[in-house]
Image (tube, rainbow, N blue to C red):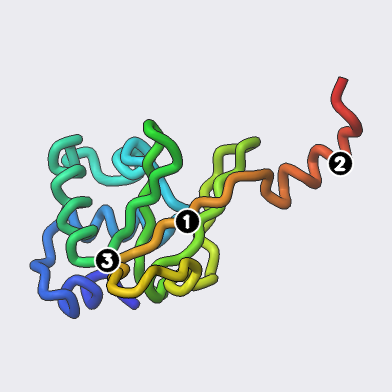
Amino acid sequence: MDVSDILRLNGLKKTEQRLAIMEVLQRSSEPLTENEIREAAPADCDRITLYRTLQTLIKADIVHRITVDNIAVKYALSVGQKGSHVHFFCECCGRVICLDENTSNIVSLPPGFLQNECEVLVKGICDQCRLRKSKSGPSE
């Protein structure tokens, strides 16, 4: 789906910054940090504009925020993702991967509780790093 269509369907104005940020996220195969987005976006997208635009896109549920730890935060388009889903963080290379599994029913809540969202982050070693480690042999 074209980023202009996504904005229109969500009732947001089509601004240069929104289009640029969404196109950067759409081209990326994995979630990006604010710095990575800013580096790939046009030069006129300063830090404050980027932050405000990301907040608008998050509020509209077009982009989702992935908190890896207290410092690292990454962003990805929510288009194609249905509800909450699992993210995988590779402790070796630092990649964050959105997994397709829907996690909306992963936790059974007590009666009377109402879930708004569910964030699940699995930490480990991705397939590529695991393969590299197995080819290089045991560490010393």
Task: State the image quarter where residue 80 is shown.
Answer: bottom left
Whole-percent x and y of residue 84? 40, 67
**On the image, numbered disc 2 is attached to which residue?**
134
* Residue 80 to residue 62: above or below: below
Whole-percent x and y of residue 117? 33, 64
**On the image, numbered disc 1 is attached to which residue?**
120
Q: Nearer the viewer, mark 1 or mark 2?
A: 1
How many numbered callouts? 3
Task: Please state which amino acid type lies under the numbered disc 2.
Answer: Ser
State the residue in front, 20 or 131: 131
Task: Please state which amino acid type lies under the numbered disc 3.
Answer: Ile
Q: Residues within 10 Å of mark 3 (few under 14, many from 20)?
A: many
Residue at x-position 45% and y-position 42%:
68
Q: Are marks 1 and 2 in contact (CB under 8 Å)?
A: no
Secondary structure at numbered mark 3: loop
**On the image, numbered disc 3 is attached to which residue?**
62
Q: Nearer the viewer, mark 3 or mark 1?
A: 1
State the residue in front, 106 or 63: 106
Task: State the image quarter where residue 51 is shown.
Answer: top left
Label located before the other in sequence (3 or 2)? 3
Label located before the other in sequence (3 or 1)? 3
Label located before the other in sequence (1 or 2)? 1
Determine the residue located farthest toward the top in the rendered image: 140
Residue at x-position 50% and y-position 61%:
86
